[in-house]
Amino acid sequence: MTALANKTSTRRRLLLASDRSDQSGELADILQSVSDVDTISTKDIPEKPDRNLSGIVVDINLRSAESVQRVRNRLRAEAYRELPRLFVLATALHHNSMQAWALGATDTISRPFDAAGILARIHSAFPDSDGFDATDRGQALNVGVAAAHKVMVKIFQKLPAGIPLNLNDIVEAENKIIKAIKHCSLREWLTTVGCHHIGSYRHCLFVTGFAVAFAQHLGMREDDQRRLARAALLHDVGKAFIPVAILDKPGALSMEEMSLMREHPRRGYDALAAQGGFPQEMLDVVLHHHEFLDGTGYPDGLSGNQISDIVRLTTIVDIHAAMVEKRAYRLPFTHAKAFATMEQMGDKLDQQLLQAFRPVVMATR
């Protein structure tokens, strides 16, 4: 038999750590419909998780200092650092939520339970054990990054030279990118593309990784994941027509240079619209990913309902990616600092969508 044939597909396995044995039964029943579940007391959380464990669900009283400290002591161990963790909130109150994030939650759910909503969270937060070993994951990551890089070359080198960009060039890459992020992790994607020496390439690859991971976290259909991957890959296509000296300037741009930089959404839109063959929603993202809900963005000063959902999402991941990237003139923000800064932007961004992005950010820590 081949190595592929020897692989077996198994259900995900979850650890449900609970100090609420009288209340966790309903949750365990929901989880068991899609997972193998081991329910234990938080006192019995092992020092090291089993290798085949997909993640841990924590159901405790977040107002109990003793319970919180017990869980913190276990989960801060290096062996648990990479393990996804979903916390159950008694209510959606701010205090409970903040306590969960402080304990390293990658997502949260609240009582009363909505079975369909919980299962969607489980599918996005905890991957299936689908027979992908470390070699497969490494290959998927390398293939995905290479496919995305190939698109960047066509955008930044061939397009300015008059060689048209074809939608098929994007479609060819999107499935490889989606597979890479699904079977590896956003953290691995960011680490790999973060070494890229060309800043414009790196930024587009960061944005693409965040967009696909966000779509997968939200439980979007694969068709919608592909739409977001395409939009993210193309969002900065207009920078291909901005002088490299400005794109790679190792310092703050002058007012004149900034004015020229702000032309990139329109230049990208005009180039793709003139060429034809690109969906309107992709052109919308290219033209409007710097618009803000309060009308202070550019190039058209759109506001509120004039800005589509796909543009709102791309704007969020674009801003976050820009802040956490290495830049010659400043140190990168931590993911937590970048997210907090975006929260402070208030009604410029879709704050409800931004909060949905939080677990994606937390998973990259």
Image (cartoon, helix red, strand yellow):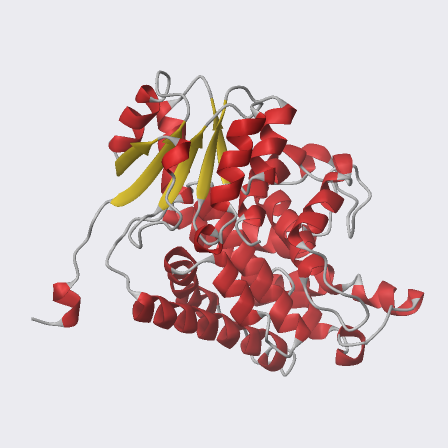
Picture layout, residue 87 above or below residue 229: above
Q: Describe residue 238's horizontal placement relative to residue 125 as left or right.
A: right
From the top left corner, tell me how far across and down residue 211 is, in percent. Answer: 54, 52
From the top left corner, tell me how far across and down residue 135 is, in percent. Answer: 31, 71
Q: Quadrant of the N terminus?
A: bottom left
From the top left corner, tell me how far across and down residue 336 is, in percent. Answer: 67, 48
From the top left corner, tell me how far across and down residue 218 is, in percent. Answer: 47, 40
- Residue at 48 percent of width and 64 percent of height: 188
How many numbered badges does the structure rendering display? 0
Location of residue 262 by image quarter: bottom right
Picture layout, residue 60 above or below residue 233: above
Residue 312 visible somewhere in the drawing: yes
- Residue at 36 percent of width and 22 percent of height: 24
- Residue at 40 percent of width and 33 percent of height: 43
Location of residue 205 by image quarter: bottom right
Residue 278 visible somewhere in the drawing: no
Picture layout, residue 272 above or below residue 294: below
Q: Residue furthest left?
A: 1
Q: Describe residue 361's horizontal placement relative to residue 306 as left or right.
A: left
- Residue at 57 percent of width and 53 percent of height: 365
Q: Is 81 in front, or is 41? A: 41
Q: Describe residue 309's horizontal placement relative to residue 241 as left or right.
A: left
Q: Is 349 in front, or is 79? A: 79
Location of residue 13 by image quarter: top left
Picture layout, residue 278 above or below residue 308: below
